[in-house]
């Protein structure tokens, strides 16, 4: 699969980075045995022959393997970034140069470029959209409704995107099938929890090089991403405080051994704040006011809306970049607040996103969800569809097999027992 950049439409930072990208993509592949098996099958069966796909994902070494799976499967794909700061420029270059895949993504692209690339993806007239956050699907519905008839369906990677799809469904505008990759067990149990947990701390450490042991780390939100982040922060020796709005999750955090309190209170004691709620302005003006001098704030939720940076800016006399992805805001009250990664996903801005071993399962789900859409073309109702449980279980089985882990199977007697109701106490 060797291509030359001349023929492939693209907008990437620097094609000379391709050899580095190739090396790093191959390294990631070592931890992605499930997706590799899917790639091998797709190469033989060509499930995407004649299908145009537009993928809006973080352009990482792991996403490269998903894009390669689609290309090997005969798909005609374009790839754009799902976040202005998450693109790995060497990966983008390699996909164009070595794999002949059209990529439109640059690390640090401005909002106008990001938006332009969303329309570039739609210009491809996709039959399948692979979305991470629902930006392409939202643009399609709002601005290119005439293209909806081209669509077989979409797949959605993340919690925020699923929340948006549900809102579209409620408004009656989701008129095509959307595969809910996020809620597959082999996705959110691992990617959202262990992936976000590890990569968020990785991002904070790479951006600041600070010691986490003994720090008060405030985790806002105790969904799967919050659970993983709190767990890993505790593992590094931090005193973890959780903030929540959901009473059940709050009890869960308490019983998992974390202190739970409102943000008003947490703001006064936290050394490091991590937002993972999916909602807006979780840390806002009144919180900045009461934070300790030198408090660090960052976000690991999908959009850069969780920290109200506008009001922080309004309270500040100046802002200085003190390290890569690390900005110090000097407040009128004499204190300073440190913001990491401009309030965007810190794990992808300052680090490399989730490790390959979890993305293996997430992207196996994506690849199989795309295949499912093609196989069931015209048969799926409009709306949000779960990944079939057999697919989810098969991904887990393949992962265990690749890890060399064997598990038990039910005996005939146990199967009979679970199917009967007559034997009790
Ligand atoms: N989302 C979080 N981590 C990621 C990664 N490594 N690649 C693609 N998408 C991601």
Image: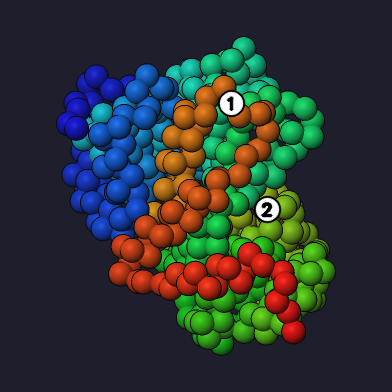
In this figure, which residue is indicated by the disc labeled 2? 278
Return the x and y of residue 326 as percentages of the image width and height: 50, 61
Q: Position of residue 138 (x, y in %)?
A: 64, 30
* In the image, residue 153 above or below residue 148: below
**Label ID, residue 379:** 1
Q: Which of the pair 178/209 is nearer the observer?
A: 178
Residue 240, how many percent across, how many down?
Answer: 64, 80
Q: CA distance from mark 1 to mark 2?
A: 32 Å
Is 113 left or right of 92, judged from the image as shown? right
Q: Residue at x 73, y 65 (%)?
A: 288
Query: Residue drawn at (66%, 29%), measured in percent from left and top?
Result: 381
Asked which quadrant contains residue 332, the reply is bottom right
For label 1, count other residues whose C-alpha is less than 10 Å away and answer few (under 14), some (14-19) or many (20+): few
Examine the image and state in which quarter residue 420 appears.
bottom right
Q: Is residue 330 visible?
A: no
Nearest to the eye among marks 1 and 2: give it: 1
Query: Which residue ends up furthest to the front in the rendered image?
Result: 422
In the image, 238 versus 222, the foreground residue is 222
Residue 235 visible to the viewer: yes
- Number of residue marks: 2
């Amino acid at each position: 699969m060797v291509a030359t950049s001349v023929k492939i439409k693209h907008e990437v930072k620097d094609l000379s980075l391709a050899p580095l990208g190739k090396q790093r993509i191959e390294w990631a592949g070592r931890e992605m045995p499930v997706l590799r098996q899917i790639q091998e099958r797709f190469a033989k069966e060509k499930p995407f022959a004649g299908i145009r796909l537009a993928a809006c994902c973080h352009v990482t070494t792991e996403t490269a393997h998903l894009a390669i799976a689609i290309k090997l499967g005969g798909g005609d794909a374009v790839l754009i970034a799902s976040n202005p700061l998450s693109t790995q420029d060497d990966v983008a270059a390699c996909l164009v140069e070595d794999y002949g895949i059209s990529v439109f993504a640059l690390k640090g692209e401005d909002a106008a470029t990001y938006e332009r690339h969303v329309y570039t993806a739609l210009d491809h007239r996709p039959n399948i959209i692979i979305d991470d956050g629902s930006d392409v699907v939202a643009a399609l519905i709002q601005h290119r409704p005439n293209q909806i008839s081209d669509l077989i369906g979409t797949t959605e990677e993340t919690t925020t995107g699923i929340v948006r799809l549900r809102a579209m469904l409620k408004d009656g505008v989701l008129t095509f099938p959307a595969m809910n990759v996020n809620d597959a067990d082999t996705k959110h149990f691992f990617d959202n929890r262990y992936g976000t947990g590890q990569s968020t701390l990785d991002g904070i450490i790479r951006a600041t090089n600070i010691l986490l042991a003994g720090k008060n780390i405030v985790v806002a939100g105790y969904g799967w991403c919050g659970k993983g982040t709190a767990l890993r922060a505790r593992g590094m020796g931090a005193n973890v405080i959780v903030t929540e709005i959901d009473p059940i999750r709050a009890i869960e955090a308490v019983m998992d051994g974390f202190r739970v309190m409102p943000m008003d209170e947490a703001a006064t004691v936290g050394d490091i704040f991590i937002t993972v709620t999916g909602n807006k302005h979780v840390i806002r003006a009144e919180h900045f006011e009461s934070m300790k001098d030198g408090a660090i704030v960052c976000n690991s939720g999908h959009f850069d809306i969780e920290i109200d940076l506008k009001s922080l800016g309004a309270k500040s006399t100046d802002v200085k970049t003190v390290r890569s992805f690390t900005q110090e805001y000097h407040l009128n009250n004499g204190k300073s607040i440190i913001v990491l990664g401009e309030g965007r996903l810190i794990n992808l801005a300052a680090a490399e996103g989730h490790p390959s071993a979890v993305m293996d399962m997430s992207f196996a789900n994506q690849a199989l969800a795309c295949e499912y859409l093609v196989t069931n073309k015209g048969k799926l109702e409009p709306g949000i569809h779960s990944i079939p449980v057999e697919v989810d279980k098969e991904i887990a089985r393949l992962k265990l097999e690749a890890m060399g882990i064997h598990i038990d199977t039910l005996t005939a007697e146990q199967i009979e027992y679970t199917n009967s109701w007559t034997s009790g106490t």
